[in-house]
Amino acid sequence: MLKGQIVSGDFSKIVMRVKADQEVELGELLVIENNNEKFILQVYDLIYGSQISQQNLEMVAGMNLEEGSFSIMDENLRNYQLALLKPILNVGDKSKTCKKLPSFFSKIREITKEDLFFITKPENPLYLGKLRSGSKEMDFNIFLAGRDVLSHHVLIPASTGKGKSNLMSCVLWEILNHTYAGMLVLDPHDEYYGRTGLGLKDHLQKDRVSYYTPSNPPPGAKSLKVNLSKLKPEHFQGAISLSDPQRQCLYSYHKKFQENWVFSLLNEQKIEGVSFHEDTISVVKRKLIALLNLDLVEGQLHCQGIFDAVAGENTISEICQDLENAKTVIIDTSFFSGAIEILVGGLITTEIFNKYKYYKRIGQLDDKPVISVVLEEAPRVLGKKILEQGSNIFDTLAREGRKFKVGLIAITQLPSEIPKNILANMNTKIILGIEMNSERQAVIESSPQDLSQDNRNIAALDKGEALVTSTFTKFAVPIKIPLFKEFAAVKKEKEFETSFSGVGFS
């Protein structure tokens, strides 16, 4: 369908006069055909145009308002809309980045499925939703290369209520259909497993879901207990604030007493040749007792939280084994303080990262699935203020994880709080609606594709609409994310049919 015609512009701003009977939206995809090639363009702004001077337009408006109907022009010819377009791709025998202008006065039409022949389903696919042109959902599935995308980190920035949880639920459900990735989900709202509603427990592959909770585990779930012997000083980085002497105290006790270091520190056992100020020991004890929910009475250690002196010996190793088997592990952190959640997440992440570094050294890494760690409210561990206190495991992953097939999915409302070098390392960004201009700019400036003209486009995204910019896509792809309840119902039906295909009944 004809939408309009080029009337002016330059390479970064092609101006199209919109046909009078057509509507054009922000983010809409359009096509120009020149000879044997096509240009795919996207609308990034809309303005009014008129052949009548501004003074006369104001006069006509005044006459209409004060005197009733008045006109001195043919509205369809003299007044019109102009759409500002940016070239996205030049599609000939193959698609490539646009480096030239289409012909002047070229006619522009709406995009169709046939124009997208160059977008194919990759190996290890990760389904995200349908292609979107403006607000119109097209019957065209968008897949990313799941293994590459997850190992090279994903950022999901969005304002409250724009559909972050819905997107993540769909992604986790989809990944269970494949075996290329193990997912570690730190769930501060206890929403992904589906304890009280629809969730991953309802998937046909629910045997590949491990759910750990500290409170009343439902059938099939596991109680979250971690043995104190598994804690190391580096796990506390980012969880609690420590001065240099306090940090040295932790490392000294761990070096001397190994697995019994926490109990030894709380009992203030002496370390030969090493002395700490009594205030340092006192403060460290108080911080550990408060964080780990411990109590020391007459030399006896009483554990009241998830950290235990007896139970939980194999919890971390079992979680790591599940991740290596491409399972999805959900840790219910809804009962924890933020510090405990960071401590538990850092403990598990450190262990799996060290295992994968070992696999690379011995040449076995290629046989392992990608591991992806889902971080809600990512600035808690990747924020500028947190990292000023020292690096942590999540910062290390953002910088080095791709080499070892361990990636992050960082979810946040405030991407500007994350340092630019970390944002730049997030090679895929699934951008939902962002209301604050400063937050939009932080994402735009760190995106793999040029989004300098997409500020209004991002601001106008409704719930469930997203813009996917990635080093693994040819352009920034607008998508419509399905509603999780509908997505899961359709997927369950298809999975059920597939599981019985070719089976005869007598």
Image: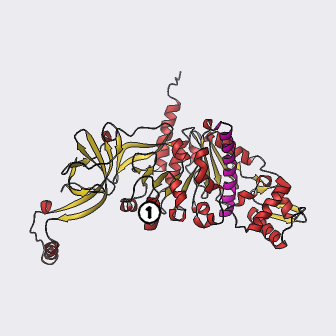
Asked whether 140 falls inside the magenta stretch, the response is no
Residue at (76%, 55%) from the top-left corner?
Answer: 231
Q: Quadrant of residue 66?
A: bottom left
Judging from the image, what secondary structure is the residue with disc 1 in? helix
The magenta segment is 338-364
Q: Nearer the viewer, residue 104 or 492?
A: 104
Q: Is the residue 1 above or below the residue 121 in the image?
A: below
Q: Residues within 10 Å of mark 1 (few under 14, many from 20)?
A: many
Q: Is residue 58 left or right of residue 117?
A: left
- Residue 9, image x, y percentages: 24, 58
Q: Magenta part mainly helix, strand or loop?
A: helix
Identify the residue at the far left of this view: 72
For the image shown, how many numbered marks are present on the structure?
Answer: 1
Could you tell me the amino acid type at mark 1? Arg
Asked whether 343 falls inside the magenta stretch, the response is yes
Q: Which residue is mark 1?
A: 440
